[in-house]
Image: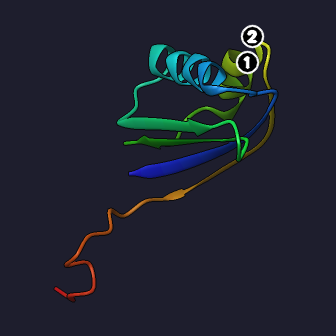
Amino acid sequence: MVETILKIDGMMCGMCEAHVNDVIRRDFTIKKVTSSHTKGTCTILSEEALDEEKLHTAIEATGYRVLEVSAHPYEKRGIFSFIKK
């Protein structure tokens, strides 16, 4: 799994978050997406790394501006994540 975090300029409300989330769901194969207009972020979980240029293009077509993209491996954390296998 890969967690991709976008810094986005221009989101002002919950409807803005919904617009960004809808574009991500429509244009990419993902597991989960959440956005926060107060933090100016969008967090995406996917099986594979996403195309950064395509992310910029898709989101900026909706009127928002992508300021930064960072991606890193994601490991689900739970109550038993501290136990070594």
Q: Is residue 40 above or below residue 66?
A: below
The residue furthest front is: 13
In the rendered view of the protein, which quadrant contains the C terminus? bottom left
Q: Is mark 2 on a helix, strand or loop?
A: loop
The residue lying toward the viewer, choosing from 68 and 47, is 68
Q: Is the Cβ of the residue at disc 2 closer than 8 Å to that at disc 1?
A: yes
Residue ID for mark 2: 61
Q: Residue 83 location in percent, x, y?
A: 20, 87
Q: Residue 51 location in percent, x, y?
A: 61, 32
Residue type (three-letter) at the residue carrying disc 1? Thr
Q: Give the number of the disc on residue 57.
A: 1
On screen, residue 20 versus residue 10, left or right, reads left
Q: Is residue 28 above or below residue 82?
A: above
Look at 73% across and 41% down and name the residue there: 40
Residue type (three-letter) at the residue carrying disc 2? Ala
Q: Give the number of the disc on residue 38.
A: none
Q: Label 1 neighbourhood size at 10 Å, few (<14), some (14-19), many (20+)?
A: few
Q: Label 2 neighbourhood size at 10 Å, few (<14), some (14-19), many (20+)?
A: few
Q: Is residue 35 above or below residue 75?
A: above
Q: Residue 76 location in percent, x, y?
A: 32, 62
The residue lying toward the viewer, choosing from 50 and 18, is 18
Residue 30: image quadrant is top left
Look at 68% across and 26% down and name the residue there: 13
The residue lying toward the viewer, choosing from 22 and 30, is 22
